[in-house]
Image: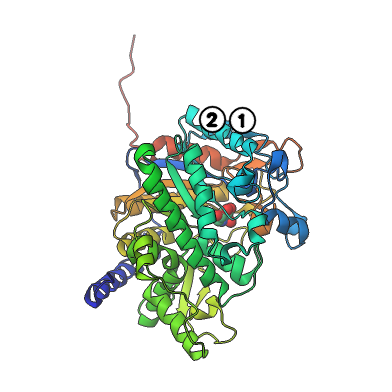
Amino acid sequence: MDQCLHCRGLQRLCRFLLLQKFSSQSNFDRKMYHYGTFPEGFSWGISSSAYQIEGGWNADGKGPSIWDTFTQTTNTIPDNANGNVACDSYNRLNEDLYMLRALRVKSYRFSLSWSRIFPDGTRKSLNQKGVDYYNRLIDGLIAHNIEPMVTLYHWDLPEALQKVNGWESAEMIDIFNDYCDFCFATFGDRVKFWITINQPQTIAWSGYGLGNMPPNVKDPGYGPYIVAHNLIKAHAKAYHTYDDKYRQSQGGLISIALNADWAEPKDVSVRREVVAADRAMQFQLGWFAHPIFKNGDYPDALKWQVGNKSEIQGLPQSRLPSFTEEEKNFIKGTADVFCVNHYTTKIVSHVTARLSPASYEYDWDFKEEEENDSPTTAIPNQKVVAWGLRRLLNWIKEEYGDPEIYITENGVATEAQTTWDDSARVFFYKAYIDEALKAYKVDGVTVKGYTATSLMDSFEWLNGYNVGFGLHHVDFSNPNRSRTPKYSAHFYYNIIKDNGFPLRVEICSHSSPNLQ
Ligand code: NOJ
């Protein structure tokens, strides 16, 4: 059942108060360093994804994915880069395990390449050699007490499935479910942390709206909404499959990794700007989190914006599809924990956007600017605004009823030529992890885990190899793809060892010299 207006009003009020609490902080306060440690058993991890690191794009029977096709047939990526070899992790599994062991991480987040397991996307094409590779990886992790955190789908859709319209087709729901079912049955005896889909908002908007990422569908007014609808249902179905068939015997948990920038109102004393910032949160994060973590349905902000715009555009119905009551019940509550990928903060203000052409972006009625007082990075629109993470975590706590939160990605790009001296990354992690600590210690947010992105420099999607997020440098000009720890690897190792930033009290020991 939908919440009553009174409760909804109260909840909204909470969020305004929350914003006010933080917005009255001075610049000094919001950057102040906090000492302390995370709870015992905190899950310190590091991440990668299949297409970004594996290479072996057609090795041992792997089928092509939409990223293979895209990178091999277009020249939009710097240096025409592709993931054909990438970090060559398909052949260098032991080297990856070595880095993970040296870091002493508790978990490793990686993804399965769907078309390595099912070359044509379906079970009938099963490729045992692909399964063997993941078994070796999982066994290697377990042998060293590193928990596998497995993403089932991190953007690399089997090309064969795109030929039948990919995520625009509702048939994908069953097809994805069968792939997940196979993975639960095959790896679930050892994998206890599943993530169905990585950043569905990116898939829907960049893949099927802007079309700058594969499958390069440019349909900004309809594509993202149709695709998101199918992704949400596909996620929910996979969740139920796990819940019904595997949870009891395997005892793991399952969620979805949602991307969220923090949206800071341009002027917190202007109600319209606060509402615009809240809308920004809903359009990016709430689009998926609201149905899954709240009531099975889209946030009011989306229903209202897209519905109104569609009406003024003279359309017979909203471009935002709706869920039936049965579907809402099926979707609601389909995540055991809250997984969020976070990189940066935007300053948001209200605008009245154009009506034509119809577009997800024009449905927002807000605009985003960069935060002035923060360092830039190798990706200009990803500034280092650490305090945004604390606010985001508080917002999630308020909005979704204090879920257990795992930060499943957080990291910063540096120039590709940064070999080991990545002090900018050290600063980034020090500041961001400290904000997560404040959220946990000071604000009482239930932060259960933190995953640094990424294990090593890798194929960085539209940026190719021009930037790197890695805590390890990879020499892409060397056929051995040699890996070298950067400063940040040593720094992260120490944070993990200390479980945060304990205050070290220096004991002054002026004991009397022993005169003999
Ligand atoms: C989010 C994606 O999930 C990840 O694959 C990528 O490396 C980072 N963004 C950085 O761009």
> What separation in Å lies between label 2 and label 1 (alpha carbons)?
8 Å
Q: Which of marks 2 and 1 is in front?
A: 2
Is there CB contact under 8 Å for labels 2 and 1? yes
Answer with the quadrant where ligand 1 appears in the image.
bottom right
Residue closest to the eye, 154 or 393? 154
SS of the residue at dot 2?
Answer: helix
**Residue 316 picture location, percent across and down:** 49, 87
* Up-down relation of residue 278 to residue 46 (above or below): below
Residue 267 seen: no
Amino acid tagged 2: Gly
Label ID, residue 140? 2
Above or below, 118 relative to 168: above
Q: Say which label, 2 or 1, has the lower sequence index.
A: 1
For the C terminus, the image quarter is: top left
Residue found farthest to the top: 516
Residue at 61% x, 30% y is 94
The quadrant of the image that shows the N terminus is bottom left
Q: Residue visible at 47% across and 40% down?
A: 185
Residue identifier under label 1: 94
